[in-house]
Image (cartoon, coloured by chain):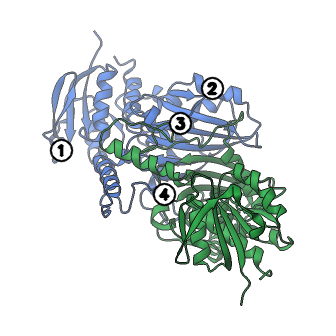
Chain colours: A blue, B green
Amino acid sequence: MPKTFDIAVIGATGTVGETLVQVLEERDFPVGALHLLASSESAGASVAFRGKNVRVREVDQFDFSLVKLVFFAAGPAVTRSLAPRATAAGCTVVDLSAGLPTSQAPNVVPEANAAVLSDLPLPVQVASPSAAATALAVILAPLRAVLDLQQVHVTACLAVSALGREAVSELARQTAELLNVRPLEPQFFDRQIAFNLLAQVGTPDAQGHVPLERRLVDELRELLGMPALKISVTCVQAPVFFGDSYSIALQTGSTLDLAAINQALAMAPGIETVEDDYPTAVGDAVGQDVVYVGRVRTGIDDPQALSLWATVDNVRKGAALNAVQVAELLIKGHG
Amino acid sequence: MPKTFDIAVIGATGTVGETLVQVLEERDFPVGALHLLASSESAGASVAFRGKNVRVREVDQFDFSLVKLVFFAAGPAVTRSLAPRATAAGCTVVDLSAGLPTSQAPNVVPEANAAVLSDLPLPVQVASPSAAATALAVILAPLRAVLDLQQVHVTACLAVSALGREAVSELARQTAELLNVRPLEPQFFDRQIAFNLLAQVGTPDAQGHVPLERRLVDELRELLGMPALKISVTCVQAPVFFGDSYSIALQTGSTLDLAAINQALAMAPGIETVEDDYPTAVGDAVGQDVVYVGRVRTGIDDPQALSLWATVDNVRKGAALNAVQVAELLIKGHG
C-alpha cells in the first residue's frame, strides 16, 4: 500500500484551486484526507473529489498540523499571512500565488529545473510560477542544448480566466452588450475588453513595466538557470476566456539547426508540437496537459533568429497541473 | 482657383475603398470628376461623396483616359491586370493592393520616405504598403535619428476588417453562436476566431513565413531605407473588428536616451503618444488619422532594448489615408 498524504488546498473555490483538486484526482495523487479551504465569503461551498462533495471551510480557522502538504492557490497576501503557520506546523508548501520570495521558495517547473528539488529535505516551501513563465520554461529548457540563447522577446496574450471568474463574466457581458448594441459599461476591466486588446495588465512601475512582466522575466531566468538572459516581455490581456497564446522571438549566438530544434521540441516532455498547422488556445490547449508549439521558423534572412508560437491552458498546465507535478516530485522517495 | 484632378477609385465598395472616398472628401482633395469602380458583382451600388450618391460602375468597361489619378483598392490581381492600361492612358497609379513589384511602384509612407516622390515626374506608379508596415514606418522613422536600430521584433495583432466585410460578419456570427451556446460553424475562417487568436494569417511558405509577414519585412526595410535591418514578425488574427495592435521590441546598438526617444515620438508627424495610460485599437485608434504609441520603455535591465505598443486604424491610417497622403504629395507642385 502506498503511503498517502493529507493535503490542504487554499483557494479551493477559485478557478485554479478547483482545477487543482480535479488534477489531484485525475493523476491519482496519493491523497489521504483532503481539506479544502477558502476565505470566509467562499466557505460553505463544496467541490467534487473522487465522487464526493467536499465542503470548503474557512482557512483562518484551519489547524495546519492536520496535513503534510499545502497548496496556496489564493492571493499572495493569503500566502504571506498563512505560509509561516503551515511551515511551522511541518507542512510542505507549494505556492501558486507568487506570495513568497524566491530565496525562500524556489520556482519549479519539472520539465525545466526538477533538479532544484533533489537536494531539498521535506518539509519545504516551493513555488509554481506564472503560467507564462511555466509555458516558456517548458519550451526553452530543451532548446538550451541545441542553441545559444541570447535574447527572448515575448508578447504574452493572456486569457481573462487568469483574473478569476469575475473577469470571465465581464468579457461575456461586455461582448453581449456590444453585439446587442447596448451601451458598454466596463466594471471589472477599466475599459472595453470585448473585441479589443489591453496592453497593460496591472500598474506599471516608474520604468514602465508591470509586475507581471517583471515576474515573468525573474521567473524565467531562474527556471532556465540563466540569470543574465535578455528578456523583453509585453503582457496583453486578450478577449479570450481560457488559454494563453505566446508569440516568441529568440535571438541566438550562432546559425541555427532547425531539424535539431524541431527534434528537441518533439522529444521534450510537456510539449506537443504542431507541424503542418498551428495551435490555438481554444482549439488545442484548453483542457490539455501540455504546451502546444507551432510556427517554428528561422528568421527571414537571419539564420540566428527563431520565431515560435505557443498556446497553453493557463489555469491547468500553466498553474494547477504544474503545482501538482511539483508535488509529485516532492513526495517521490517519501512514499 | 486650384486645379482639380479627375480620379478613379477601383474597389470603391470595399472597406478600404469606401474609406478612401470619405478621406478624399474630408481632406478637400482637389477632386474633379470622381469615378467609382468595382467588379461586376458590386457595380450598381452607390457611395456618398460631397452630399451626392455616386454610382459604382463596372471597372472592366472603364476608359482610363477619363482620369489622371487612379487608386487601386481591390485585390492584387485586379491591379496587375488593369494598372498597365491606366498607366498607358497617362494616369498616375496609387496601388493599395501590393499588386505591383516595388521596382516598378515604390512603397511610400509620407512620414517615413516622402523624399522618394520628389524626383518622380508624373505620371507614376506608387504603392501604399500594408497597414502594419505603414504604422511601423511612421513610428520607426523618427527614431532612426535617436537610436542605432539593429533588430525589430513585432507581433502584429490584426483586425478582421483587413479581410473585408465577410470576415467582420463571421467574427460577429461566431461570437453570437458561442454566447448563445449554439454549435460553432466556421465559414470564412477555418476555425474559431471568436474568443481566440489565430497565429497564421495566410499560407506559410517552405520556411514557415506567410506572405503578409514577408511583405511587412520587405516594405518596412524599403520605407526605412534599411535593407539589412533584422526584422522578425508574427502576424496574428485577433478577434477584433477594427484596429490593429502592435507589440514592438527593438534591440539597438547603444545605451538609449529615453527622454530623446519620447521627444522624437511626440514631435513626429502621424503619431499621438499616450504617456500616462496606453492606447487600444478600439478606444483610441479607430476612426483616427494617427498611429497611437504607448508603453514606451527600456529593457528591464537592458539599456539598449526598447519596447513599445502601438495601435492604428488599419483601414483608415493604415491604408486609405496613407494612399491619399501619398496622392497629396504627388499632386503638390502639379496644381
Question: Are there few (<14), some (14-19), or many (20+) residues within 10 Å of tag 2?
Answer: some
The residue tagged 4 is: A199
Q: Nearer the viewer, residue B64 or A29?
A: B64
Q: Which amino acid type is shown beneath numbered disc 1?
A: Ser
Q: Looking at the image, tell me whether mark 1 or mark 2 is earlier in sequence order.
A: 1
Nearer mark to the viewer, of 4 and 1: 4
Mark 3 to mark 2: distance in Å?
A: 14 Å
Mark 4 to mark 2: distance in Å?
A: 32 Å
Q: Residue at x 48, y 39 (%)?
A: B187
The residue tagged 3 is: A137
Q: Nearer the viewer, residue B134 or A92?
A: B134
What mark, if any, has residue A264 been given in the picture? 2
The residue tagged 1 is: A42
Q: Looking at the image, tell me whether mark 4 or mark 1 is earlier in sequence order.
A: 1
Q: Which amino acid type is shown beneath numbered disc 3?
A: Ala
Q: Are marks 4 and 1 in contact (CB under 8 Å)?
A: no
Q: Which amino acid type is shown beneath numbered disc 2?
A: Ala
Question: Are there few (<14), some (14-19), or many (20+) residues within 10 Å of tag 4?
Answer: many
Figure quadrant of residue A128: top left
Q: Is residue B189 left or right of residue B302?
A: left
